[in-house]
Structure formats: C-alpha cells, structure tokens
Amino acid sequence: MDWTIFWVASTFAVYIGIAIWARAGSTNDFYVAGHGVHPVVNGMATAADWMSAASFLSMAGLIAVLGYGGSVYLMGWTGGYVLLALLLAPFLREFGKFTVPDFVGDRYYSDTARLVAVICALFVSFTYIAGQMSGVGIAFSRFLGVDFNTGIFIGMGIVFIYAVLGGMKGVTYTQVAQYVVLIFAYTVPAIFISLMLTGNPIPQLGFLSNIKGEDVSMIQKLSDTLTSLGFAEYTTTDKTTFDVFCITAALMFGTAGLPHVIIRFFTVPRARDARLSAGWALVFIALLYTVAPAVGAFSRLNVIETVNETTYVAPGEAYEAEAAALAAEGITPSPDWFARWEATNLVGFEDKNGDGAMQIRGPNAPDGLANEVTINNDIAVLASPEIAQLPDWVVGLMVAGGLAAALSTAAGLLMVISSAISHDLCRRTFFKGMSDKSELRVARLAAAGAVVAAGFMGIYSAQLAFVAQVVAFAFGLAAASLFPVILLGIFWKRMNREGAIASMLTGLIPTFLYIWHFKLGAGKDAGPDEWFLGVSPEGIGFVVMIASILVGVGVSLATRAPPQEIQDLVEDIRVPGRRSPHGGGDADMAPAE
C-alpha cells in the first residue's frame, strides 16, 4: 500500500465532507461562522490557522541550519500570539465587526481608512499565502511524483472546495480536523527519532539528553560535529544583537496584526469567549512549538551523519544496484533518501574535488575542502522520517500533516481576502445597498478569484528563500501597517482618521520597498553594512512600525479630535458587556452577542 496516497486522500476526503456538512447559508456564517463557535473548538481552529507551512515545514529547518539564530522565529511568533491574546483579541471581539478593515473603517469613521486597511490586509495576506503555496508544492512534488507547480494547483483545488463552499464556518471545522492531523504528524516521527538518538521518548527531553550509549549531550554532539566541519557552534549566531531584536520584534508585533488570526476571534459568541479560545489556542500551539527545536537538531545531526563522506550514487533505476555494489566493497553509498529528494531539486551535489565523495563543509572547514552538498531547509521536517528510516506509514503521515498545515492557513487567508473584497470594498464602501444574498455571492466569487491568484503567488515565491522567510515578510508588513492602528484604535481615543491613514501608509510603503529592494531588487546581494542601521529585511518591519506609530500620533495631535461618539465607543470596548451602538453606521452593523 502507498501510505502517502492513503493518508493524503483520506484527509482530503474528510476536509471535503466537513465543507459539505458546514456549508454557509448567510454572510454571518461565511464571515464569522455565525458567531457560534465554542472557545475550545475555536482554540483548536486558531492553532491550525496559526501554525502554517512555515511553522510545520520551515521553522525546524531554520533552527536546524541557523541554530540559535533560528530561534528568533520561535520566540517572535510565540510572543506575538501572547500579545494578541492579551492585548487585542478580546477588545476586537467586543468591537463586534466582521474584518480588520471593518474595525479600521468604523473606528476611524472613514471609508478612506477602510480602503487603506483593505490594501494593507491584501498585501499581508497575499505575501503570506505565497509561503503556504510554496510548502504545498514542495510536499506534492516529492511525495506524489508531480512537479512543483502542479502540486500547488492540486492544493488550491482542495482549498477552493471547502473555502468557497463553507466560508468561515466550513474553514473553522476543517481546521479542527487539520489540527488533529498536523499535531499527530509532527509529534509521532519526533518521538521515534528521539527514541533512536537519545533513548528518551519525549522529544523535548531528548533534545536535552545525552546521545544514546554515549556520555555526551545531544546539543554538544551536534555542536562538536558542526565545528569539526567548519560551521559555527550550534548555540551561536552570525546576526548582531540589534538585528536579532528587530527580527523577533517584527515577528511578534506582526503576529498581533495578522488579519487571518484576528478574524478567528470574531467567531466566538462573546469577548469572554475570545479570551478563553486564545488560552486554548496557546496550549494547542505549544504542543508543536516545544517540539520544533528538537526536530531541527535531530534533523541536522541525522543529515550530516547519513550523507557526509559517503560515495555519491546518482538517482535513477540503477541506484539500488550501484549502491549494493559499493556496499559489497565496504564503501558507504549516498543514502536512498538523498537520491529520492534529488529529483525535486531540493537537494543537490556538486563534486568539486572530483573524488566522488560527498563533503558537507562550512566556511571555515579545517581541511580546506569546499561544501559540495546543498539541502533546502524546508525539507528538514518532511524528509526526517526517511532520513531516520522510519516506516512508510510515518512518512505518509508526515506529508498529510504538512499539507494540513499549509492548507489550513491558506484557507484562513482566503477568508481575509474574500471578505476584504466583498464586505469592505463592495458592501461597506462602493455598493452600500447590497443585499445579504448578493454579498454572499460576491464573497464566494472573491474567494474563488483569490484561490487562483494564490496559486500564481505560490509559484512565484519559489524564487525567494525558505518558506518561513517568505512568511516573515508578511509579518513585517503587518507589524508596520496594521498593528499600530489596531493598538492605538483600542487604547488611545484621541487617534483620529488622519492619523490612522498616515500611519498605515507610513508603515506599508517603506517596508514593502525595503524588502523588495534587498530581496528581489538591486540590493539582493547586499550585506549588513548596506542595510539601514544594520537591520535585515526580516526585521525592518519593527523599525518602520516605530516610525508609523510616531507619525500616527503626530498627525492625530495636529488635526481635529475624533467625534465624541467614537471616543465613547473606544471607552465602551474596554469594559466587557458595556458595548452599545455609536453612530448610524455602527447601528446598522450592531455587535452580535
């Protein structure tokens, strides 16, 4: 039996079945699942929404390669979620709208502010969804034998069915199923590998334990191995302290501004339930995030031990015979997992010294040899069961988990994109007399269009770096453009529409241009000396966010204060249960309880 096809087909059938069962019948169902999701269910759905392909596929890979430097993703994303849960989610739920642009438009009593927020949300969502589609393409291309682009379109076809049909209601219950799949897929192989390497079945403890049968810790063994090959120690980083701080902060504040995570808190009945679901989501997220450092370290050690100094055997039909012939001569052939992944172009070998052996070396290799092996970080998780020679059913389960992570987040992002177009642009800005039925039809069409656009974005994102770093750009954009207006909109009633518009534009434009210049444009080969204040593109969102807040505050103080009814509204949302309609537009879209 082909276990990969079994797991992928079974889970996809479940997702489609849930979508049919949870078909949305109104805009309330389509945007916010009828405000009727239980906090525990919403916590699980939020965890799946939050833990994207970047978390599942790429975070452990970055930690594996960057060591301590990769921990910024772990710290930033986790810290951001806590910030969102404590500071923003309950108040946004108390505000009672459908979308983040909806909040901005009504809080700042301006269709222009709403329009700018829509642009920011679309920028963030499309950038983020590119990373998810890239992850889907990687998984399909290796395990289903299709090329990268075809893999992306298969994934988008599945999302198309349950996102367009069920809206947020369908997406919510599908994400619950996806969470169950991805957490099993992530932890089961980690338990096996931890047992094999350290004898400890708990990966978090195995990460801190001694190597099985040796009197040396797993971390020390990895560090010693890396330094002997010319790499830096595993517990160091080549980034400056200030850059590490900026990247962590950009990820943290960007998390709190991500629209697809924020809208999950609109699906529960009350503000109190938003707090409860945030707590449950943190528990569910921790189950995966505390395992990631162990998975990264195990993977790095296993890759080096199974590949370095083996004799290269090219992939193809003759691989098994050639490998067996070398083994019979007492020569260790390159592993079969490397040959299988070589067909996807995600690993590679160049015999620079002509000796036929595969040398993994760092920039300071003591023997002076050059590195001959390239391995894409994104396969560190997907390939780990194969590298550790685990059973085929574990390999198949891992693929299903990776796809679940990518598709759950992609569906949440599609909801943001479709609601921004149908609700914020059409119903609340350009066609204010639109009926509920027409808006639902437009929402489904917008979701369908977004699916197609996301597919092309995923294909284009293959030109960028790792999935997690592509996603990191979305966090920078969210931190600089959306987070300041949400934070100030809740906690400072003097913030007005002029300040909000100036703040969002100040955050969005410089951040986008900086990232574009240093990642895709003329400055893509530049180093820290040419970065502004030495801050990398991944961390620039935090620097621009500070400027965005200062601009928003300055412009607000220099212009007229918000109307009294808006200031009363801001006072209301800080006290649970005191929320009442303020103004004509707010009365038409009264908060649900």
Image (cartoon, rainbow, N blue to C red):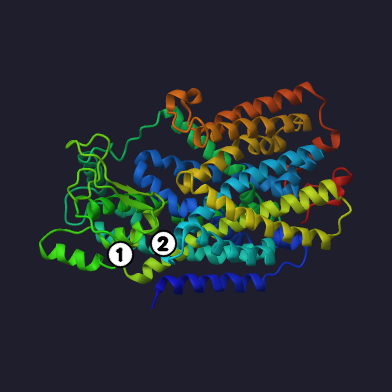
Name the residue located 50 percent from the left edge and 58 percent from the top edge. Answer: 136
Q: Quadrant of the C terminus?
A: bottom right
Left or right: residue 73 versus residue 268 is left
Left or right: residue 117 versus residue 362 is right
Q: Residues within 10 Å of mark 2 (few under 14, many from 20)?
A: many
Circle 1: residue type = Gly
Q: Residue furthest top?
A: 558
Name the residue located 44 percent from the left edge and 50 percent from the top edge. Answer: 58
**Where 562 falls versus 12 (above or below)?**
above
Q: Quadrant of the N terminus?
A: bottom left
Q: Residue furthest bottom?
A: 1
List x then y, in percent, for residue 330.
Answer: 10, 61
Mark 1 or mark 2, earlier in chain: 2
**Where 48 falls versus 562 (above or below)?**
below
Choose mark 1 or mark 2, whichever is in front: 1
Dividing the picture into quadrants, the one containing residue 187 is: bottom left
Find disc 2 in the rendering and name its residue: 142
Q: Residues within 10 Å of mark 1 (few under 14, many from 20)?
A: few
Find disc 1 in the rendering and name its residue: 316
Residue nearest the viewer, comparing 28 with 523: 523
For residue 572, which numbered disc appears in the image? none
Circle 2: residue type = Arg
Left or right: residue 579 versus residue 69 is right
Cα separation between marks 1 and 2: 15 Å
